Image (cartoon, rainbow, N blue to C red):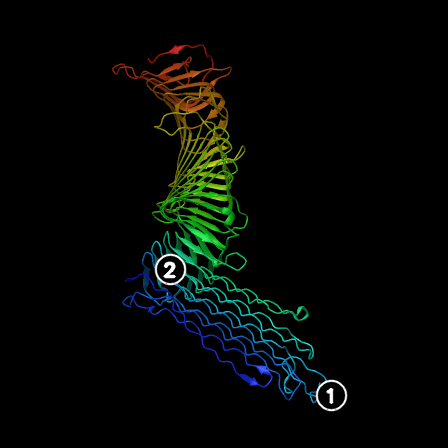
Amino acid sequence: MTMHVRALTAPALLSCALAISAAKAGEGRGGDGGAKGGSGDRSLGAPSDASTGTGGGGGEGGGRGGSGQGTSSKRVDGWGGNGGDGGEGGVGLSLSRGSASIGAGSTIKGGNGGRGGNGGDSGPGKTNSNALDDSGSDSAIGGAQDYDRPAAKTAGDGGRGGDGGNGVTIRNGATLTTAPGVSITGGNGGDGGQNGIKSRSTFGSVRRHANGGSGGSGGSGVVADQSGATIINAAGAAIVGGGAGAGGAWRGSVSRDRGQAGAAGRAGAGIVATGGNVAIINSGVISGGRNRNGTRGAAITFAGSGNSLELQAGSAIVGQVLGGSNATLILGGAADASFDLRGLGSQYQGFSDFNKTGTSSWTLSGTTSAFKGDMAIDGGALVFSAGTQLTATNAQIANGAGAVAAVTVAGAGSQWIADGRIDVGHQGQGSLTVANGGTVRANTIGVGTGAGGSGAIHVTGSGSHVEASSLVLGDGGAGSAVVSGAGSSLSATDFTVGQSGNGTLTVANGGKAGPGRGRRIAVAKNSGSTGTINIGAAAGQTATTAGRIEGDVQFGAGTGTLVFNHTDSGYSFSNAISGAGTISVLSGTTILTADSSGFSGTTTVSNATLVLSGARVGGSLAIDGGGTVAGEGSIGATTVNSGGTLSPSGKTSLTVNGDLTAHAGGTTVAPLPTLTPAIVPEPPSVPPSSVTVLASEPFTTSLPDETLVEPV
């Protein structure tokens, strides 16, 4: 059940009573300390409790120290008493369990600390010829002399100002929620009292001078002093620490006897969480109180581990946030906002994790070198603007089941680095876009790394780069990468497309991807996996300008495919291809130059041209309608289907290492052998439909005389 707290009354200040009397002849008695201020008039416990409370009462002011009086029997100065300390302000509201909602426009304030009492003045002594110093000589003894105590000082110190009370105290894992317009403030610290004034007596020397009292510290806006509390601060609400009390001013006129003014107190924090596992969600204002020099106290102080601070649109944090250990900083909510990374490590200290949640899009700016923790982007979008730089240990995009999240690193100088691993789409749907000069670098990048998860990398624009030592597209889930645009690249020393899931790599419009020359791209590495490399566009999509693969292609135990679907009229592919897979030539003119005799799969050419420039291609070849295979080199068993053309060309021969079959409507431009292998026609009773050359030996065509051989 949730309680609602409506507008609260102003704090009640308790009256101050003091008594001053002489403890002994010759010294003034110190003033009494002020009493602690009263608490708010109700503490909220179970949800059934009353839901109203008042601000804490102010602490009483400290009593003034008694004035000293010299004695008539001793030649001494009288000692002024110290001022009493100011009383502590009371707590505005206590929440012991359950939850409480503070209604719109309500005000809760801790009581102000009481002012410290002023020190008592010293009194002038009287002449007494029997007054002796420790050597037995006749002398005047200054200070609080009373033969049974040594001389110390002649005037009293000012009393310390009382500390301000806390606005709200939370215990037992309770939840506090504010509404717009709510104000929760810690009480101000009381001012320190002034010192007493030393008399102008000429008796003796002063051994320690009287000083002003120190100021009291401001109370915290909210204190969660046990684990598990939750604080939700709405837009338009404010949680503010109390201001620091001023130190008591030094007063007097004898420069050689000058003491010191009291030190100022410290401003209260906006929120103090001491128990660990405290969650703060803020879209309003959280501010430290004001110190006497104009600076602010800490906005939030965490102690213990497992704490988190979630910033949402409208959040204003004034003062430092001290994260304690294992704290998490979160950018969340539904509304878009921005965050300056320069505060990460300076204003926001001690955070080991930096996360993104909610459906909002947060834009990052600035740079930081202080943060080295982990990142989890589990909702919405995180955008690195131009020049933004951030380094993490590990990062995950859409880690949890059902999560949908995206990261964009865009613009010149933008950079996201992970010393360890970046996972894109573990069990959720994640995407990483690097554009217009952005850079992402990690030791390991996994895309689509969990069952049911999917991930995608898009690298676009000149100067955009993604780099890793190891890259896997599809490792348990579905992972894809598209590299498009001259000057864009995706590189990894160990490069896999489909390891134990479904991987796809597309290179287009001059983009480059791969491990580099002399290394291999593993495609469909493990049994049950699928891997596809698209040069230009995927099968079934409109062809586009090709990109480039840097590295040889090695098909594994899964289902692997290499697709050429581009618009180039002379695209040269110098990468070797090996293993059992599928090569689909669907559009454009592709020129093979490497030794791919280790390929044992099927090559299909349709509505496109495949030219061999001394290349050797193993496996089998099917030339479908609109497809042409030309050039010199060697191919495996070949079938020319209706509308397909086999057209050897070049200075040497084109060798078919296997059967050559030409179906009706298929065309070969080459002389056919007449002996071995034999040409076997179909029976006369069947309409002629194909010509088959049986491969008892390789079939070689060597005369590109454009001799047209029709089926018999």
Q: Position of residue 218 (x, y in %)?
A: 47, 64
Answer above or below: position of 434 versus 486.
below
Q: Position of residue 696 (x, y in %)?
A: 42, 22
Q: CA distance from mark 2 to mark 1?
A: 71 Å
Front position in the image: 617 or 486: 486
Asked whether residue 706 appears in the rendered view, the answer is yes
Alpha-carbon neighbours of circle 2 within 10 Å: few (<14), some, or many (≥20)? many
Amino acid carrying label 2: it is Thr
Q: Where, by quadrant of the figure, is residue 200 drawn?
A: bottom right
Alpha-carbon neighbours of circle 1 within 10 Å: few (<14), some, or many (≥20)? few
Front position in the image: 593 or 427: 427
Numbered badge on residue 230? 2
Q: Where, by quadrant of the figure, is residue 53 drawn?
A: bottom left
Which residue position is annotated with label 1?
136
Q: Nearer the viewer, mark 2 or mark 1?
A: 1
Q: Position of residue 468 (x, y in %)?
A: 51, 41
Identify the mark nearer the N-term, 2 or 1. 1
Amino acid carrying label 1: it is Gly
Q: Residue at x 35, y 68 (%)?
A: 96
